[in-house]
Image (cartoon, rainbow, N blue to C red):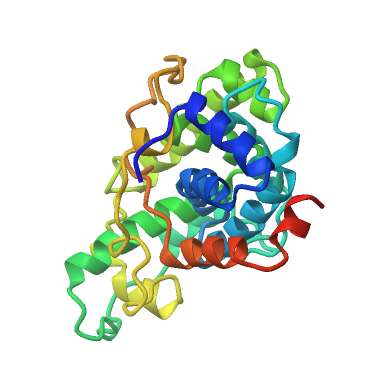
């Protein structure tokens, strides 16, 4: 779908709030990729992101009439999604938060030698690429939820401090400071341990069988290498991009954005075709 300007969105939102179901569909489809990508990075797995995205989309539909157009629609959506995700308790890592110490210890001490081939004839280069993006995405779980959200907004979505402070309800100075600290933690860990993005010895191609054995990689469920990338410009207006607050800006190339999976598009269609949509929208 082509990107829609804020002015066009505001007109469509007015129509949606007046009962125009087609306008409502256009509005919700315009932000599905934003919601999914934020959820994917915040929660660490595609399945959890799909579930959370549906919850957030339902929340956006039911609260659409409260959008007062005092900011960009995407800013309002980010605020709803961020608050939901920071408090989301149904994802895989909710009860067992990871830490950089845990990750580092696993890299240094895991026995990755002499393991049987568990690739099930899937190309090892593809599995190594899958593991690379999976590992770096799950690594975000080593940050607390507030720091993780700030890192994602500033590093992946490149949102500047003025807009981010509105989304998160903190000062611009606080946002910049917390973003810089989070990026420093990630960059230091990658530099020390990761051979893909830093100066470390850990190489994904050497850990494929270990990752499969420990259920971190499934050769028959490739969430990253089978997903279609989408440019950030198609998701968000990046003309107000993040200020250059540190030297880490270009060190996180794993922060790619992807098209929403079909299950989310189907959920939107089913929701908006529900006989209860008017009740839902006005609740």
Q: Answer yes or no: is residue 104 visible.
A: no
User: Left or right of 158: which side holds 279?
Assistant: right
- Number of dots carrying numbers: 0
Asked which quadrant contains residue 102, the reply is bottom right
Residue at image x 28%, y 48%? 195
Which residue appears farthest toward the right when viewing the image? 283
Q: Answer yes or no: is residue 43 visible.
A: yes
Q: Where 93 sits versus 12, above or below?
A: below
Residue at image x 59%, y 44%? 143
Q: Where 186 sits versus 281, above or below?
A: above
Which of the two residues, 70 or 254, is positioned nearer the viewer here? 70
Residue at image x 78%, y 50%? 282
User: Left or right of 132: which side holds 8?
Assistant: right
Asked which quadrant contains residue 273, the reply is bottom right
Residue 84 image point, x, y percent: 70, 48
Residue at image x 70%, y 32%? 67
Residue 222 image point, x, y percent: 34, 70
Residue 39 image point, x, y percent: 55, 51
Asked which quadrant contains residue 231, the reply is top left
Q: Where 116 sits versus 167, above or below?
A: below
Residue 2 image point, x, y percent: 34, 40
Which of the two residues, 121 or 220, is positioned nearer the viewer here? 220
């Amino acid at each position: 779908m082509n990107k829609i300007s804020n002015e066009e969105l505001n007109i469509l939102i007015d129509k949606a709030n007046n009962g125009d179901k087609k306008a409502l569909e256009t509005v919700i489809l315009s932000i599905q990729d934003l919601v999914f990508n934020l959820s994917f990075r915040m929660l660490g797995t595609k399945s959890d992101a799909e579930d959370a995205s549906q919850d957030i989309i339902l929340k956006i539909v039911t609260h659409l009439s409260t959008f007062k157009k005092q900011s960009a629609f995407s800013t309002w959506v980010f605020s709803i999604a961020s608050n939901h995700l920071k408090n989301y308790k149904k994802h895989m890592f909710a009860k067992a938060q990871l830490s950089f110490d845990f990750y580092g210890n696993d890299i240094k001490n895991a026995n990755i030698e002499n393991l049987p081939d568990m690739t099930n004839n899937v190309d090892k280069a593809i599995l190594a690429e899958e593991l690379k993006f999976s590992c770096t995405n799950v690594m975000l779980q080593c940050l607390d939820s507030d720091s993780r959200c700030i890192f994602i907004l500033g590093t992946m979505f490149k949102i500047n401090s003025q807009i981010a402070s509105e989304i998160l309800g903190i000062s611009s100075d606080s946002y910049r400071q917390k973003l810089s600290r989070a990026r420093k933690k990630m960059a230091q860990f990658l530099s020390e341990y990761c051979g893909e993005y830093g100066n470390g010895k850990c190489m994904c191609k050497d850990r494929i069988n270990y990752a499969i054995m420990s259920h971190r990689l499934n050769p028959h469920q490739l969430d990253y290498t089978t997903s279609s990338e989408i440019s950030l410009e198609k998701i968000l207006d990046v003309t107000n991009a993040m200020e250059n607050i540190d030297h880490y800006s270009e060190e996180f190339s794993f922060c790619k954005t992807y098209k929403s999976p079909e299950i989310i598009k189907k959920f939107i269609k089913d929701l908006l075709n529900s006989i209860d949509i008017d009740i839902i929208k006005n609740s």
